[in-house]
Structures are given as structure tokens and as C-alpha cells.
Image (cartoon, rainbow, N blue to C red):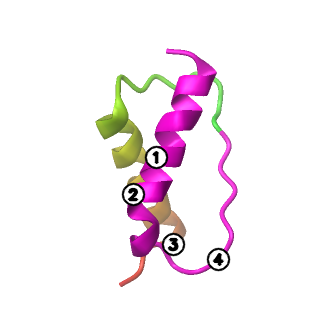
Amino acid sequence: MDRNRYKRLLRESFRLNRGRLADGDYVLYLRPGCRWEGFAEAERDFLDLCQKAGALKS
């Protein structure tokens, strides 16, 4: 997949899970080497990162 496809997957993950996130501004950058196969992996990694950052609502 290309970088634009990964960005679309990340934006969609954010859009669908916006209600689960704490209020605030979010800036996300894709690092080189991203190897998602599809949306499920992108969403899983996105939510895992938000959990680690403490950005998910209780």
C-alpha cells in the first residue's frame, strides 16, 4: 500500500473512534515502514497508541 492509503486508514480510524477519545487536539504522523494490511490493523494500532497515551475516555 502507499502512504496516501495509510493516511486514509488512519483518518477513518480516528473518525470512527472520535467519541472514545478525550477532548483535545491530535496530531498523528505515519512513520516510514508502516505495514498495515487493511483497516482492522490500522484501527487496532491506532487504539493501542491512544490507550498508551492515555487519550481514551474511561
Label annotation for residue 27: none
The nearer-to-camera label among 1 and 3 is 1
Residue 46 in the image: x percent, y percent? Answer: 45, 50
Name the residue carrying label 4. Answer: 24
Instruction: Locate the C terminus and report the quarter of the image it occupies.
Output: bottom left
Amino acid beneath label 2: Leu
**Is residue 1 placed above or below 28 in the rendered structure?**
above
Q: Which residue is mark 2?
A: 16
Residue 4 position, x and y percent, is 61, 25
Magenta-drawn segment: 1-29
Q: Amino acid at mark 4?
A: Gly
Label 3 or label 2, whichever comes before in sequence order = 2
Please tell me whether residue 39 belongs to the stretch shown in magenta: no
Q: Which residue is found at the position 51% from the left and 72% from the top? A: 55
Q: Which residue is mark 3?
A: 55
Q: Are marks 3 and 2 in contact (CB under 8 Å)?
A: no
Q: Is residue 4 above or below residue 19?
A: above
Q: Which mark is residue 12?
A: 1
Percent across and percent down for residue 3 are 61, 23
In the image, what residue type sits under mark 3?
Ala
Q: Earlier in the sequence, mark 1 or mark 3?
A: 1
Question: Outermost residue toward the top?
Answer: 1
Q: Are there few (<14), some (14-19), or many (20+) residues within 10 Å of tag 3?
A: some
Residue type at mark 1? Glu
SS at mark 3? Answer: loop
Q: Are marks 4 and 3 in contact (CB under 8 Å)?
A: yes
Q: Nearer the viewer, residue 48 or 15?
A: 15
